Amino acid sequence: MVEKSEWKNSNDGSNYIFVGGSARSGTTLVQNILDSHPDIFAPGELNHVIEVMKARRRMLSTVKEHSNRLDGRDVIDQMARNSLDSLLLVPLKERGMLRISEKTPRNILVFEDLYSIFPKAKYILVMRDPRAVISSLLDVGKKARESKLPIPRNSLNLFEAVFYLSKSLVNSGKAIENIGGDLLTIYYEELVEKPTAITKIITDFLELQWSDEMERPGDVYHEGVDMMTEGDMSVYYDQASYQRNVDRSSLNKWKKNLKPWQQVYIQRHFEGSTVFSDVPYDFQLEGLGVIKFWADRVRCIVYELWVETIMLRRRFFSRIGRL
C-alpha cells in the first residue's frame, strides 16, 4: 500500500490512467492486466467519463458564443475535473493504491479532451488487426440474436462494424499525433505473444515497478467481473472468458470466421491505413486463386452497392419525415 502523501490532489490527473480503443480490440485484457498490479485499481467500465467530457464540450460551445466570458473555459474545465475526481480519486483513496485505471473503449473519442484537462495522466491505446476486431464484433451480434438481447449497432452487420472501426481509427490517429509521449500504444498481437516484455513496457510507461502478477490476470479476482458479464453485457463475456490469462487462442480466429468476400471488403477499407504504420498488418488474402479473388471482389462491390442503396433510402425517408 502506498503512503497517502503520494496521492495527488492538484487535479492534474497524476494518478489516472485512461484506456481506450475500439470495442473488441483487447482493452478489457489490458485493464485486467493493470488491475493485477498491486499499485493499480482497475474496476469495470464506468461509462460516465465520456458523458462528462461530452457535457464539457457542450458547455464550451456556449463560451465560444459568448466570448466576453473570459473565465468561462477555466470554470468549465474545473467542473469537469471535479466530476471525474468524484468518480476516480475517491475510490482510489479508499483502496489506498497509487493509480486508478478507467477503461471504456469509447474513451478514445475523448482522449484529447481528457488530455487538455489532465495533462499529467497516462493514456493507453489498444490496437488490434481490423479483421480480428470486425470478426469479434460480428460474433457479438450473433450471440445477441441467439440470446434475444439488444444488438449493439456496431455488431449489426459487416457495414456497421467497418463504419464503426473506421471512425475509431480516425480518433486513434488523432490521439497518437496530439498526445505524444503521454500515450502508449499497445498492439494486442504483441501483448499475447510477448506478455512479459509488453507488461514491462507498460510499467515503465507508468513509472511503476513491474509485477509478475501482470502476466497472469486470470489468477486475480477483478471487481468488474459481474458488471461485465451480466445482462446485456453477457454478449461480450462470460465469467470464464473475462477472468482469463493471456493466451494466443483468439489470434487467428478471424481467418476461420470471416468469409473470403468479407476479408476483401475489409481489405479495401483498411489496407494502407497510416494508423498501422508502426506495426503494419498484412492484408494480403491467403489461399485465393485469381478467379476466386475476383469473384469475391465482385461480390464485395455488389454488397457495397446494396449498402449505398440502403443508405440513400434512409436519407430519402428521413427527409420526407422532416417535411
Image (spheres, helix red, strand yellow):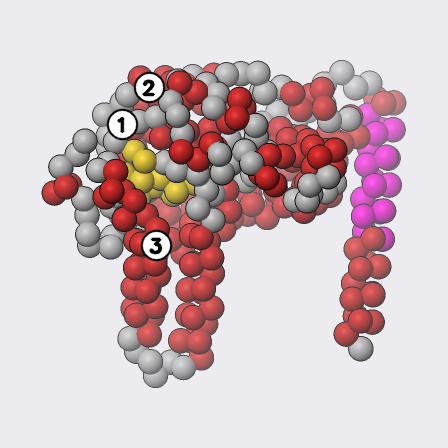
Residue tagged 1: 38
Q: Main secondary structure of the magenta part?
A: helix
Provide the residue designation for mark 3: 84
Q: Are marks 3 and 2 in contact (CB under 8 Å)?
A: no
Q: Nearer the viewer, residue 49 or 267?
A: 49
The reply to whether the C-beta atoms of the residues labelled 1 and 2 are less than 8 Å apart is yes
Residue 307 shown in magenta: yes
- Is residue 98 visible in the rendered image? The answer is no
Hey, which quadrant is residue 149 in on the image?
top right
Determine which residue is flagged by label 2: 213
**Residue 99 numbered mark, or none:** none
Tell me which amino acid carries mark 1: Pro
Q: Secondary structure at mark 1?
A: loop
Amino acid type, callout 3: Leu
Packing grade of label 1 (10 A; few <14, some 14-19, many >=20) is some
Residue 60 location, quadrant: bottom left
Q: CA distance from mark 3 to mark 1?
A: 23 Å
Q: Position of residue 152 (x, y in %)?
A: 65, 44
Which residue corresponds to the image point at 43% horizontal and 17% vertical from the top-left? 194
Nearer to the camera, 22 or 270: 22
Examine the rendering and report whether any part of residue 211 can be seen: yes
Residue 39 is covered by the magenta coloring:
no
The residues colored magenta run 293-309
Query: Considering depth in this image, is 16 or 1 the residue closer to the camera?
Result: 1
- Circle 2 packing at 10 Å, graded few (<14), some (14-19), many (20+), is some
Give the SS element for disc 2: helix
